[in-house]
Amino acid sequence: MAVSGAGAPAEPVMDLAPQRGPGRITAALRDIGAGLALWRLGLALGWLDIKLRYRGSILGPLWLTISTAVMVGAMGVLYATLFHMDLHKFLPFLSLSLVLWGFIGGVVNDAPTVFTQAAPLVMSIRMPLFVHVLRMVVRNVLVLLHNVIVIVVVFALYGTRPHETLTIAPVLALWLLDAGAIALLFGTLGARFRDIGPIVASLMQIFFFVTPIIWPPEMIFVGRQYMLLNPFFPVLEILRGPLLGESVRASIWLAAGVHSVVLWALALGLFCRMRARIAYWI
Amino acid sequence: MALISVEGLDITFPLYHGNSRSLKRTLAAAVQPARNAPSAHLQQDARDRVVVQVLHDISFRLNPGDRLGLIGSNGAGKTTLLRALAGIYEPVAGRVRVSGTVGALLNTNLGMNVDLSGRENIRLRGLFHGLTRTRIAAVEQDVQDFAELGTFMDMPVKTYSSGMLVRLAFGLATAITPQILLMDEWFLAGDAAFMTKARHRLEALVDRAEILVVSTHQPEVMQAWCTRVLWLDGGAIRMDGPPDMVLPAYLAR
């Protein structure tokens, strides 16, 4: 499929024809596989995106850390006063929530343009589309890593200790998988319908207030059972709970799993069907 | 062994943006008498979408040693055919089979990111081709020497003059030798001094490539390089044969 480097043992063969049914699935999975094989390129592209954004700035990507620290500090003091909360408990919660939501929001807002932004590259060479997904995920992970510093400082200041740390690594892997699915799903939709970007951006604003991010989940009593329907809450909670040293209910784990499976099914279904058309749209 | 085989290739572009219904109505009168005229035309597909037919029923086969020239007026589908051969546009109908490594010199900036420096763009290209760090460094040196960029190697590409940009793109594109070379006409543009230098390098590349497909408006380039010429007209093959046969017919049209 992809063009391999000089000196490759077997000659690459590209055989393209309109596909139906299983052929589409194979072609889509091959795209994802070839994209993953180019992980070094995805990594370099994602890193250069961050570097470019802060080229010419003195503090560079450190601004990510600083702006998050400022936001956490300001919001923490404000909301702790408004809600009459204990800063010792609230600030670790808020810093973790805001940083994790920053990642979710970054991924979801970047997703609709993941293919359209790569148009010059797509038009000049045949390249697995999944490379652009990798690039976007890498870019957002790098932003997240800069913001993790804020969490570490706040946790150290207030002595917050994570527990059930065994689940953290698999949950992080699930987050990366879900980020990939979001990029495939909204990236494909966004290449075809240019309104997806603004729609997603305004919906994310609502989800920011509806999801327990600046307010703790314990604060809600009425309609509590519906919170599991919010696609962001369970996935957020299975990472946030253990990190804050709280245990997470089984129903939340289940909901997180169900949401992820549904997300991947939708993303793969759409990508399999539309992969070959994306170049025509952008 | 490199091989290109195209069977019954159709490429149509959907017209989504804007109100295609009203667009259709506006254009209906203009298109109707020209339905069979030799230009890309609007049609409706099975799902009642308005589409532009860019390539229709293209078939040919290229073996090692073949040098194919694409000729035709603007909008005849030359660039789209090159993109289809590169695997960028997958066939809407028909089949495209290409075996061998493909080098595609299609648009002026080769998909380079103009905010990145020349060096960074070269590195990305190397990573795409799966080159090792040492190979990438070698390519960097090669391109730097050829393009005479000097300190501009570490400046954003958008600060380059158009001449520097062409030199960089050219050096980069010709640093990695493919078995099949697909080339759009812009590559043959450039100032005289550069062309003399570029010509040698390009000819070496063309010689090493097993198959060449080049699209150009310049009959003399075609005469010198190609063993076969495909005349595209309105997305279909008008004539296919050796340059001595096709070129006079094309020029006399």
Image (cartoon, helix red, strand yellow):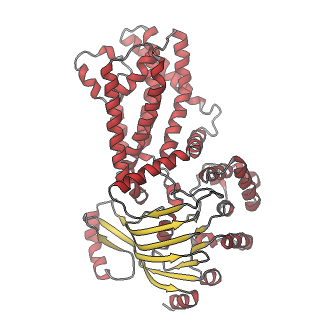
Measured as percent of width and height from the top left, residue A144 is found at 51, 30
**What is the quadrant of residue A167 in the picture?**
top left
Q: Residue at x 56, y 87 (%)?
A: B242
Instruction: Classify B41 as above or below A236.
Output: below
Tell which of A146 and A85 is nearer to you.
Answer: A146
Residue B55 horizontal side relative to residue A41, left or right: left
Instruction: Classify A6 as above or below A182.
Output: below
Tell which of A161 and A208 is nearer to you.
Answer: A161
Q: Is residue B108 visible?
A: yes
Q: Residue at x 42, y 20 (%)?
A: A240
Q: Residue at x 44, y 27 (%)?
A: A171
Measured as percent of width and height from the top left, residue B190 is found at 66, 70
Classify the position of the C terminus of chain A by image quarter. Answer: bottom left
Instruction: Classify B171 as above or below A47.
Output: below
Residue placed furthest toward the front: A9
Q: How many marks?
A: 0
**What is the quadrant of residue A253 in the picture?**
top left
Residue B167 horizontal side relative to residue A154, left or right: right
Residue B8 horizontal side relative to residue B20, left or right: right
Residue placed furthest toward the left: A222
Measured as percent of width and height from the top left, residue B51 is found at 33, 67
Measured as percent of width and height from the top left, residue B82 is found at 51, 69
Q: Is residue A75 visible?
A: no
**What is the quadrant of residue B237 in the picture?**
bottom left
Residue A193 horizontal side relative to residue A4, left or right: left
Tell which of B144 and A174 is nearer to you.
Answer: A174
Q: Residue at x 55, y 41 (%)?
A: A46
Instruction: Classify A138 as above or below B253.
Output: above
